[in-house]
């Protein structure tokens, strides 16, 4: 199986770019952030404080989270309910960043990320894919963009969805998430030593997808030696 690991900070365009690239080469796209978001969604729904590590860990035994696919579109199930459409709110984003810093939460979600890579050609995005989940991925990409540009994209996305947020609020949420994701003790966001950096600050979507595809196709062309 061929695995492409794409890591990088929030709002770098990982999911949009990865999904489009996967479609182009017929790979399965796996968004691992959705698993952390599903746990966060459950925690908020049950009125548990996402910074209360003990309470979050205790809740894990009552949660079952798994991926499913409708065609090539990833769905996420929480205790058999399809929660895919409920996971992309600012509240869930902030809580996902907090619960993902808890070691047992990461262990809880670890094996299914590896299992899906064993059975499919994939593009998988997250924070620790090239460093921890798939250290042997044939291609590793660290996708990034400036903080301002990432905030601007997130702001546009939220406005298009009809959410009236201020740019300042989006920017400060993003800075907070970056800080959580990069400085946590377990599996912090890091560029893998063998990852290729792609900075999309000055690229549009088509150019970003092309940049990723060029890297992947080159590697496929070389075989896996
Ligand atoms: O990629 P995303 O924004 O949907 O991720 C939501 C949160 O989940 C993010 O703040 C960090 C965490 N996450 C993680 O720790 N490891 C991953 N592989 C994916 C996401």
Image (cartoon, helix red, strand yellow):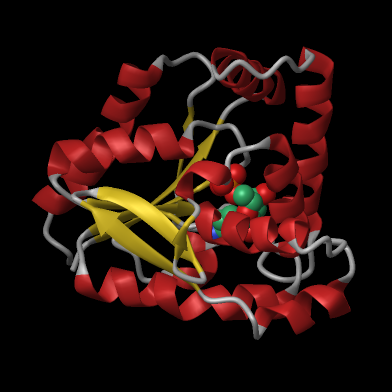
* Coordinates of residue 77 in the picture (x, y in percent): 45, 63
Q: Is residue 209 left or right of residue 214?
A: right
* Coordinates of residue 206 in the picture (x, y in percent): 31, 18
Q: Nearer the viewer, residue 192 or 49?
A: 49
Quarter-of-image position of residue 24: top left
In this rendering, is residue 67 above or below 94?
A: below
Quarter-of-image position of residue 60: bottom right
Quarter-of-image position of residue 25: top left
Residue 189 at least partly seen: no
In this rendering, is residue 134 above or below 212?
A: below
Q: Nearer the viewer, residue 76 or 127?
A: 76
Picture residue at 63% right of the left edge, 64% below the top: 39
Residue 4 at least partly seen: yes
Quarter containing the C terminus: bottom left
Q: Nearer the viewer, residue 54 or 129?
A: 54
Picture residue at 79% right of the left edge, 14% below the top: 166
Q: Nearer the viewer, residue 121 or 189?
A: 121
In this rendering, is residue 80 above or below 152?
A: below
* Coordinates of residue 72 in the picture (x, y in percent): 22, 49
Quarter containing the N terminus: bottom left
Q: Is residue 121 left or right of residue 78?
A: left
Picture residue at 62% right of the left edge, 14% below the top: 159
Picture residue at 14% right of the left edge, 52% below the top: 220
Q: How many marks?
A: 0
* Coordinates of residue 169 in the picture (x, y in percent): 83, 23
């Amino acid at each position: 199986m061929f695995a492409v690991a794409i890591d990088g900070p929030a709002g770098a365009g990982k999911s949009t770019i990865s999904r489009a690239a996967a479609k182009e080469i017929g790979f399965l796209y796996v968004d691992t952030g959705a698993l952390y978001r599903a746990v966060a969604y459950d925690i908020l729904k049950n009125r548990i404080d996402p910074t209360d590590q003990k309470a979050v860990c205790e809740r894990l035994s009552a949660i079952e989270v798994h991926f499913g696919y409708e065609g090539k579109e990833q769905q996420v199930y929480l205790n058999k309910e399809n929660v895919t459409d409920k996971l992309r709110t600012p509240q869930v984003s902030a809580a996902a960043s907090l619960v993902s810093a808890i070691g047992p939460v990461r262990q809880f979600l670890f094996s299914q990320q590896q299992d899906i890579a064993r059975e499919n050609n994939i593009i998988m995005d997250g924070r620790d894919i090239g460093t921890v989940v798939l250290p042997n991925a044939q291609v590793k990409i660290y996708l990034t963009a400036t903080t301002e540009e990432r905030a601007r994209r997130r702001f546009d996305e939220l406005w298009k969805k009809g959410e009236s947020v201020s740019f300042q609020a989006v920017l400060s949420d993003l800075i907070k998430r970056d800080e959580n994701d990069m400085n946590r003790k377990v599996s912090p966001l890091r560029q893998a030593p063998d990852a290729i950096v792609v900075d999309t600050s000055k690229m549009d979507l088509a150019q970003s997808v092309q940049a990723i595809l060029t890297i992947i196709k080159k590697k496929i062309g070389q075989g896996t030696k």
